[in-house]
């Protein structure tokens, strides 16, 4: 049986901008990036990216505390808020934290945002996007 898993990633995205330049400025290699117009893989018909994106994230990890995955991303970006804001201004970028939770067997992880995450997100004006996937489970409460 699968266990509950969490993936978190930070995304800098916009129309078109130099991905290598962003990596060099941040001194971080993205875990994923793509350019506007790139073909989105594994689709039955051709679908193309509508924006350029530089992402830094975790893989899916077994977790009962989303903050563990958020902290892994924050540790890499925490002292780079001024660079992120400079890039946002120079290329009209937006940024967002994505939290994706796959709940198995009704076992949902703790979902809270610590003060340091909130402060950092506020400084760079980042949004949060949270996706929950609750896989079916049986429970005495449902019977």
Image: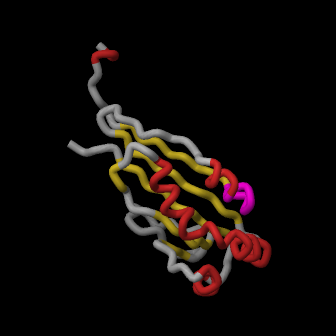
Residue 66 drawn above or below residue 50: above
The answer to which of 50 and 72 lies nearer the viewer is 72
Q: Does the magenta stretch include residue 122?
A: yes
Give the total of numbered labels: 0
Q: Quadrant of residue 117?
A: bottom right
Residue 121 drawn above or below residue 51: above
Query: Which stretch did the figure color magenta?
Result: 120-126
Extreme residue in the top direction: 143
Name the residue at 61% across, 79% down.
Answer: 26
Name the residue at 34% across, 44% down.
Answer: 4
Name the residue at 33% across, 16% down.
Answer: 142
Q: Is residue 116 magenta?
A: no
The answer to which of 125 and 76 lies nearer the viewer is 76
Residue 135 drawn above or below residue 52: above
Q: Which x, y percent locates residue 58? A: 43, 62
Extreme residue in the right direction: 89
Q: Which x, y percent locates residue 97? A: 59, 57
Q: Quadrant of residue 109?
A: top left
Q: Which colour scheme is used?
A: secondary structure
Extreme residue in the left direction: 1
Name the residue at 62% across, 51% down.
Answer: 128
User: In the displayed structure, does residue 59 sit left or right of residue 32?
Assistant: left
Q: Which x, y percent locates residue 53? A: 59, 71
Q: Which x, y percent locates residue 5? A: 36, 49
User: In the displayed structure, does residue 44 sit left or right of residue 96?
Assistant: left
**Quadrant of the drawing holding the C terminus:** top left
Prevalent SS, magenta region:
helix
């Amino acid at each position: 049986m699968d266990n509950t898993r969490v993936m978190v990633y930070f995304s800098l995205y916009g129309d078109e901008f130099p991905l290598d330049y962003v990596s060099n400025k941040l001194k971080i290699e993205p875990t994923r990036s793509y350019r506007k117009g790139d073909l989105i893989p594994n689709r039955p018909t051709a679908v193309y990216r509508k924006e350029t994106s530089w992402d830094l994230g975790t893989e899916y990890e077994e977790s009962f505390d989303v903050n563990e995955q958020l902290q892994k991303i924050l540790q890499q970006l925490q002292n780079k808020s001024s660079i992120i804001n400079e890039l946002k201004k120079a290329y009209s970028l937006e940024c967002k934290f994505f939290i994706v939770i796959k709940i198995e067997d009704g076992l949902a992880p703790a979902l809270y945002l610590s003060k340091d995450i909130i402060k950092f997100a506020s400084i760079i004006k980042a949004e949060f996007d949270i996706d929950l996937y609750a896989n079916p489970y049986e429970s005495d409460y449902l019977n």
